[in-house]
Amino acid sequence: MWKKILLSMFAVVMLVIVALCIMVAVMIFRAPSLNASDLQTPLSTRIYDQDKKLIGTLFHQENRVKVSIDEVPKVVQDAVISIEDKRFRSHHGVDVHRLAGAIIGNIKNGWGTEGASTITQQVIKRSVLTPEKTLTRKVQEAWLSLQLERKYSKDEILEMYLNNVYFGHGAYGIKTASITYFGQEDLSKLSVSQAALLAGLPNLPSADDPFKYPERAKERRDLVLSAMANNNVISKQQADQAKEIPISKILRKEEKKQEKDSPYNAYIDTVYEQLVKKEKIVTEKEFYQDGLKIYTYLDSKAQRKVYKMLHSKEIPYPDKNFEAGISLVDTKTGAVKAVGGGRHFKSISYTNYGSSVKNQPGSTIKPVLDYGPAIEYLKWPTSYTLNDEHYQYSDGTPINEWDNEYWGNISMRRALEWSRNIPALKAFQAVGSEKAQKFAGGLGIKIDPIYESASIGGFDGVTPLQMAAAYAAFGNGGTYNEPNTVKKIVFPDGKEWKPKPKSRTAMHDYTAYMITDMLKTVVASGTGTQANLDGIPVAGKTGSTNIPKELKDQYGLGNGIIDSWFSGYTTQYAMAVWTGYPSLKNKDGDIQYIRYDGSQDIAKQLFRQIMIEISDPNTPDFEKPDSVATIGSELYVKGTQPQTVPEKQTEPDSSKQVQEEQKDQEAEETDEEEKDNEDEENQDTSKQDQVEQNEKQQEDEKTEKEQDKKNEEQPDQDDKKQDNQNGKDQDQSKDEDHGQENQGPDDQKNKKAPGNNDNNGNNGNNDNGQQNEGEG
């Protein structure tokens, strides 16, 4: 009995072994052949636009100076071997000890979490295999490494590695890296510290960039020095002495123009961010030199226009330090069509103001955090009355209007048209912070923690790419598409990777349309007229961030702003433009901020110039959904519109009263509508239109008288409403929400004066973060 059981078990084990052998044999049989040409030069990654035209190659032969192994000093060889493959000289292509450790790690943490690649395997992986982490690729990699060791000596294999590996800043190969970082062509003159720094870079060349991140680079260098000491190629004393040398002492001065400028580089950088850093589809090494073909959604015409406008003399940039970031997406799909990384953007690893850097959005956040949620959750009509009055946050901290005047009862449409702060805060309070936060999160804008000051832009900020994608959802019937740059990746073996579309319903279609209709008013007759597009239906919103009072007082600054935005969209494209300065002080210590000399309007001008050039002149208008009802010029969620023309409200809206009254009104009006037949409703609507017209005429006459009175006190207001008058939009931007006397420096990301250590929403702020007010 036991013999039969043992024999059966033995037979099963043998079958498994045979099956595994057959499987491995098939994998090996399908492995690509080794070609000398492949081994000598890494494969170039190529980037293509939406029309499959090549727009960039990430590996350039001129970025590499080849060396023979005889030119590489022993200290450099030892440094590389110690950190990458300490048994390189003794194994036959595969390190069994390292492999066993990796297997255990993969069992514990999941396949692909631990690597055991030797230098030989890395040469194979960069030359002839795809970067995918599969069992087939690992088996083929091991087999080809054994073959490589049979054909070439250890020195030849190490030479291949040192000539082909990427060290960052466009430097391929050890000699190019030495020139790039130390200005040293003779490798024999490298110190132990310099050799260790270079040996540590191929792991994560951007993250450990010694020019940008010297502290991280030091940690990596010191790790290499410790490995060298443990491998007995230097003494512990030598290692300790080398660790004492600051990174700045062994580097040359960084040359900013190491990479060749190109109109497409900011977009390629955004592709890199998505594939390498955000979604981790490929590693940095694989992205640069694994022969990938990356097909993108880039619109080359739009990208060239964006690049041209960032460098154009047609735009009145005030000085060379003034920056701008731009992102353009397809309104319907979220596909990223163009990215403007900045006026000084050159290449991957440069600061990308279009897709990576966050800045406070000012009043461009109001549709996202205030009025969008009010329509979505409370079903407010565009005519909903809000009282622009002396007001305060929930903790008693006052909030001011930009002109220190208060307009009394105004509609939600007019409040958004002229970017009034107090009605925006009241809408936020009526909805509640949790629902506002949820609504914004559905549009790809995560705000946590959230304070009441966020209602007018007072939080850590957003990127233009985030804002463009969020606004696109308003133009897409409420459907949000996560911005995406890549159509597909084709690997050298022909295999493909395609991203899964990330789309969700962020709001009802009535919310999207009603916000869009109000934002069309902003561009047609409000603060955004400089961004209007002749003959093309467009919606959008201005935004700016005030200079904190503390900084004004500290440095004796005049009137001005820190950030200026315009975010807008058509049914074809959505675009967000940020303008401002990288920091409050330039390299000479001078304070820099946006003054009221026309610079505050540059965001609107960039939007208009680019959109006019790239837009289809026959771009259709936004289509009103069946869920929206119209009475006169105002919009209602269908089923909530009044059956008689409502009397004008004279009392200020309190957030709690607003919600209770709105619920009662909605319940009564819904019951009435269900009882009415369609003919009666049409008849009522006709009568309502007649009454509405009469009242609107009276209201216009009253408004005209009020405006005449206001114009006598505020000549700047008239300037804003004359589209063709010089200085019109300078006044607009001034009038957008300035006067935030309670705004502190907390949320001015990277724009604090020295010694200001306040943190966002903390240190000196109350629970509502009131010192973080934005404007515009």
Image (tube, rainbow, N blue to C red):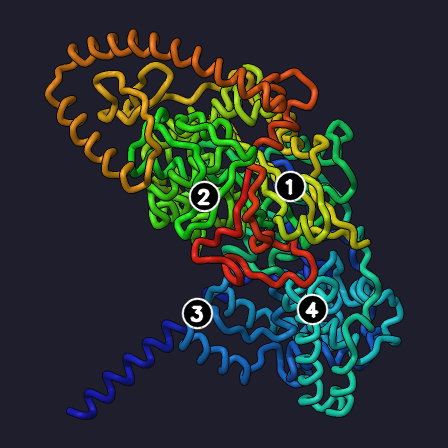
Of residues 560 and 286, which is closer to you in this image? 560
Read off the residue under disc 2. Answer: 455
* Front disc: 1 or 4: 1
Read off the residue under disc 3. Answer: 111
193, above or below 559, in the image: below
Residue type at tag 2: Ser
What's the CA distance linking mark 1 and mark 4? 41 Å
Q: What quarter of the picture does the N terminus occupy?
A: bottom left
Residue 698 locus on image (x, y percent): 38, 10
| SS of the residue under disc 4 | helix
Read off the residue under disc 1. Answer: 561
108, above or below 362, in the image: below
Read off the residue under disc 4. Answer: 201
Residue 240 locus on image (x, y percent): 74, 87
- The answer to whether mark 3 and mark 1 are in CB contact below 8 A is no
- The answer to whether mark 3 and mark 4 are in CB contact below 8 A is no
Of residues 448 and 112, which is closer to you in this image? 448
Residue 481 locus on image (x, y percent): 43, 40
Which residue shows up at 33% across the image and 26% down it?
650
Q: What quarter of the picture does the C terminus occupy?
A: top right
- The answer to whether mark 1 and mark 4 are in CB contact below 8 A is no
471, above or below 533, in the image: below
Q: How many labels, in total? A: 4
- Give the side of residue 557 with respect to residue 509, left or right: right
Q: Is tag 1's residue or tag 2's residue first in the polypeptide sequence?
A: 2
